[in-house]
Amino acid sequence: MSESPSTSSDDLSSIATAEQSVSRNRISVNESHTVSPTMASETARCWRDVFWLGIFTLHLIGLAFVLSVLGLNRFKKNDRLKIDRYTNGFLENHEGLTEDYWPLYALAGGVGTVLGWTWLLLLGSRSNQMMKVSVHILTTYLAVFSVLCFWIKQFFWGVAFAIGAALQLLYVISVIDRLPFSMLVLRKAVKMVWSLPEVTRVAIAFMLIMLSWMVIWSFGAAGVVASSMGDGGRWWLLVVLSVSLFWTGAVLCNIVHVIVSGMVFLVLIHGGREAASMPPNSLMKSLRYAVTTSFGSICYGSLFTAAIRTLRWEIRGFRSKIGNNECLLCCVDFLFHLVETLVRFFNKYAYVQIAVSGKGFNHSARDAWELFQSTGVEALIAYDCSGAVLLMGTVLGGLITGTCTGVWTWLKTSDRVIMVGSTTMLMGMILVGLAMVVVESAVTSIYICYAEDPLLINRWDAEFFNQMSETLHQRLQHRSARAREVLTHNRLDGRIPEPLPV
C-alpha cells in the first residue's frame, strides 16, 4: 500500500529526530555521571481513577454473593435454595452436586501453583531454557489439543485450537529473527529480578491471595457445572465468571507489576539496592501505593491492556510478512494504526509511571509512549517480543493445568470435559502469569530507564547497554530506509509532484 506524502515526510522527520536523540543519549553516557534528583523525588500522591476502584470493589462483593448462592444451591443436596424452579420450562434439567466438581478445580489450583512456583524457583538457573521450550512447544501442544478435541467429537474446540496452533506457528515464523534480542532482554531482566529476592516473595504472596479468591470462585463455578441448567445456560454463566476471574487475575498481576517495576526503577536510579541514597522500606512503599492511591488506575488498565497488547503482537507479526499484496496490506494497516492509537492510551509501560509518579493510567500510558517516540526507543520496543515469549509460557502453563483436570474429568464424567477443562485452563494461566509478571516488570522498567537516561543502563550493565544501543541504531536505520523507499516509490508513481522551480 502506498502512503501519503505527508505521512512519509513525517516518518522521515521523526526518525531523524529519534536518531539525534540517540546520539545525544550516547554523548550523555560519556559525559554525565549523575541522575537528576527529580526523577527519584517523592511527592504527595492523590487517589487516581477512583471510579474504576469502586466498580472493581462492587464487582467483587456482588460476585462473591452470586458465587456463594450458586455453589450452596447444589452443595450436598440438589436445589438447596430452590433456584431450579425459576429455570423449569425453558432450560434442561440435570442431576449433580457442587462437591462432584469442586475437587477438579482444587486440582487446577494446585497444578497452577506448582507450575508458578517452579518457574520462580528456576528463575535464576534455567529461565532461558524454559522460555525456549515455551516458544517451541506451544504450537505442538495446541495442535495435539485440537486432535484430542476432534477425537472426543468437540468440533468447535477442535477448530479453535487448530486456528490457535496455526496463528502461533505463523507468529513464531514472523518473529524468528527477533528472538535472539528478545531472549537477551529477558536474560537481563531475570538477572535484575534474581538480585531482588524480595520481589519473588511478593509474587508468591499474591499467588496465595489469588488462590484464596479462587476457592470462592471455583465453588460457584462447580455449582454452575452441576446446576440443572442446560449446556447453553451453563456456558453463558461460565463465560461471565471467566471474564470476572480474568479481570481479578489481571488486577493482581498488575499490582505485582507496579511493585516490582517501582523497585527496579529505584535500584537502577540509585545504582544498586545497597546504595546509601536508596530510600528505606522502598518495597513496602511501592506496595502501599499499589493497593491504595494507584489501585483504581490498576483496575482500569487491567480491563483493556492485555487484549490490546496481544492484538498488536499478532498484527505486527503478520504485517511484516505480507509482502507486496497492496489490498491485504491496506486492510492490515488500517487495523495496525487503530491498535497503535489504542496503545498510546493503554500500554504496560504505564505501570512503571504509576509506580514512580502516581499519575492516572491514561496519563501515565500517554507519557510513557511519548517518551519512547521522542527518544526513538519505540523502534526498539516494536522489535522486542519478550512480552509475547512470556505470554507463550503463561498459555502453556494454562494448557498443562487444563490437561490435568480434563483427564480427571474424563474419567469421572466425559460430558463435562471441555466445560471444566477450559475454565481450569484460565485458572492455570492466571497463577503462572503471577510468576511471569516479575520478569515482565523488570523489562518495562529497563526500557523506561533507557529512554529517561541511558546512563542508568550503562552503569548497571555496560555490555547490555552497548547491545541495546546498537540494536536501536539498526532499527532506526531500517525504518529510515523503508520510509525513503516508500517516498521514492510514490514519486515514481507520480503521486508526489516534483517541486516547482522558483
Image: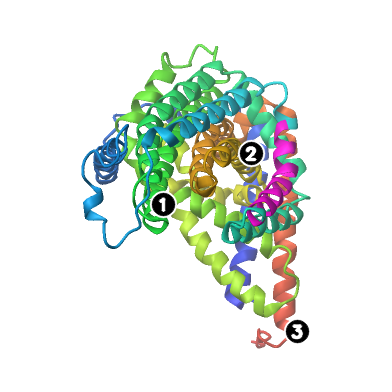
Disc 3 element: helix
Give the percent coordinates (x, y) of residue 458. 67, 29
Circle nearer the viewer, 2 or 1: 1
The amino acid pointed to by label 1 is: Val
Total labels drawn: 3
Instruction: Identify the disc placed on residue 239.
Output: 1
Give the percent coordinates (x, y) of residue 439. 59, 31
| Quadrant including the N terminus | bottom right
Horizontal side, residue 136 vs residue 279: left or right: right
Disc 2 element: helix
The amino acid pointed to by label 2 is: Gly
Distance from disc 2 to disc 1, alpha carbons, whole Å, reads 23 Å
- Residues under numbered marks 2 and 1 in contact, where contact means CB atoms less than 8 Å apart: no
Mark 2 highlights which residue?
Answer: 393
Does the magenta-highlighted stretch encompass residue 129? no
Which residues lie in the magenta part? 130-150
Marked residue nearer the N-terminal end (2 or 1): 1
Distance from disc 2 to disc 3, alpha carbons, whole Å, reads 47 Å
The amino acid pointed to by label 3 is: Leu
Mark 3 highlights which residue?
Answer: 492
Marked residue nearer the N-terminal end (2 or 3): 2
For the point 64% across and 87% down, which residue is it?
502
Give the percent coordinates (x, y) of residue 308. 50, 54
Image: 119 above or below 72 = above
Q: Is residue 363 visible?
A: no
Magenta: main secondary structure:
helix
User: How many residues crowd around disc 1 within 10 Å: few (fewer than 14), some, or many (20 or more)?
Assistant: few
- Residues under numbered marks 3 and 1 in contact, where contact means CB atoms less than 8 Å apart: no
Circle nearer the viewer, 3 or 1: 1
User: How many residues crowd around disc 2 within 10 Å: few (fewer than 14), some, or many (20 or more)?
Assistant: many
Instruction: Identify the disc placed on residue 396.
Output: none
